[in-house]
Amino acid sequence: MDIQSLYSVKDKVVLVTGGAKGIGRMISEAFVVNGAKVYIASRDAAACKAACAELNALPNVRPGSAIALPADLSSLAECQRLAAELSAREKKLHVLVNNSGATWGEAYDSYPDSAWTKLLTLNLQRVFTLTQLLTPLLEAAGQASKTAGTEGRGEDEGEGEGEGVVTDPGRIIHIGSIDGLRVPQLPTFAYSATKAGLHHLSRHLAVALGPRGVTSNTLACGPFPSKMMAATLRDFGDAIRAANPLGRIGTPADAAGACLFLASRAGAFVNGATIALDGGVSLVSKI
């Protein structure tokens, strides 16, 4: 299979939550410039509209490729409204990127109960809520790719493929964190716990939804330039870069490449994976 087909996301329908800023904005742009139709959702309606205007103005991007669907994703009613509106517009959703999230850093002795409520709701509970609501659209995308078992036949491909096998499933990509893999040095107790929970939720969804033609994978991201990381990078950026085996932080191309892989035919057999997108820093001992 040629590389253009293997990594193509052309004409796929994508929803990126928190897609107007930070890593979400990087991911949204990657899909738009590669021919996908991208819906951007976050509670900041102005930011959603501004991001879509910028993306639609990029060279070689089809008009209307980026569409704003503002919603407060911490709210059950807003998730329901978003899912209903998307379902009214589209028959299939090929890719759901669960990126919206929040953090909270505060010393252990004063860490507030409200931080747990806010982060558990947005970072974990509503990820399940929105995914559950959009599963019919994700299933429809996978069912549309069913093959009679002849796709990819060759010396090394096609063996074991039977009647009605989904070869291009619906995809769920969760944006996790290396702080869900290791214990962070900063006092972000609820954040690290919710990201660890998100990683395991993704694995659970992989088993539950795989038979329904939908995969679930996680990118455990290290430091990237974003509003959430701005203060940390300002104060500790040099040390963070020096501690990384690759000597840098993440770039838009890094986030883009990982998502395009998971969303394309190249990543169709990856299910339940937690990929550390961090240059190897999570492997480095602090002792």
Image (cartoon, grey):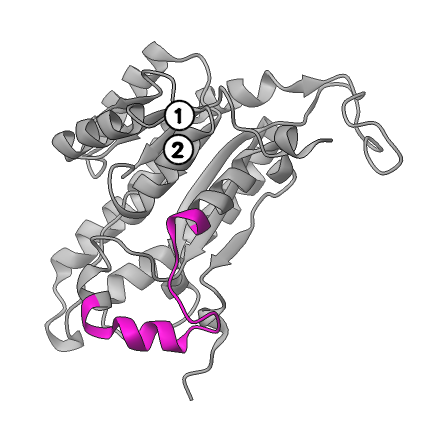
Instruction: Identify which residue, 65 or 58, lies in the foreground.
Output: 58
Type of amino acid at the residue the image marks with label 1: Leu
Query: Vertical placement of 66 versus 144: above or below?
Result: below
Q: Is residue 184 visible?
A: no
**Measured from the top left, where is residue 156 in percent x and y?**
85, 38
Badge 2 vs badge 1, beta-carbon distance below 8 Å = yes
Seen in the image, is 133 located left or right of residue 165? left
Q: Look at the image and say whether residue 245 sits in the magenta stretch.
A: yes
Instruction: Identify which residue, 137 or 197, lies in the foreground.
Output: 137
The secondary element bearing badge 1 is classed as: helix
Magenta stretch, overall SS: helix
Rendering quarter of residue 83: top left
Q: Quadrant of the N terminus?
A: top right
**Measured from the top left, where is residue 193 in percent x and y?**
33, 61
Q: Which residue is mark 1?
A: 134
Query: Vertical placement of 151 versus 223: above or below?
Result: above
**Measured from the top left, where is residue 208 in percent x and y?**
54, 37
Q: Quadrant of the C terminus?
A: bottom left
Q: Residue at x 43, y 48 (%)?
A: 253
Start-end of magenta stretch: 234-254
Type of amino acid at the residue the image marks with label 2: Thr
Q: Residues within 10 Å of mark 1 (few under 14, many from 20)?
A: many
Rendered image: mark on residue 181: none
**Measured from the top left, where is residue 113 in percent x and y?**
14, 61
Q: Which residue is mark 2?
A: 131
Q: Residues within 10 Å of mark 2 (few under 14, many from 20)?
A: some
Query: Vertical placement of 255 versus 167: above or below?
Result: below
Seen in the image, is 13 located left or right of residue 189? right
Q: Is residue 85 visible?
A: yes
Q: Look at the image and say whether residue 190 sits in the magenta stretch.
A: no
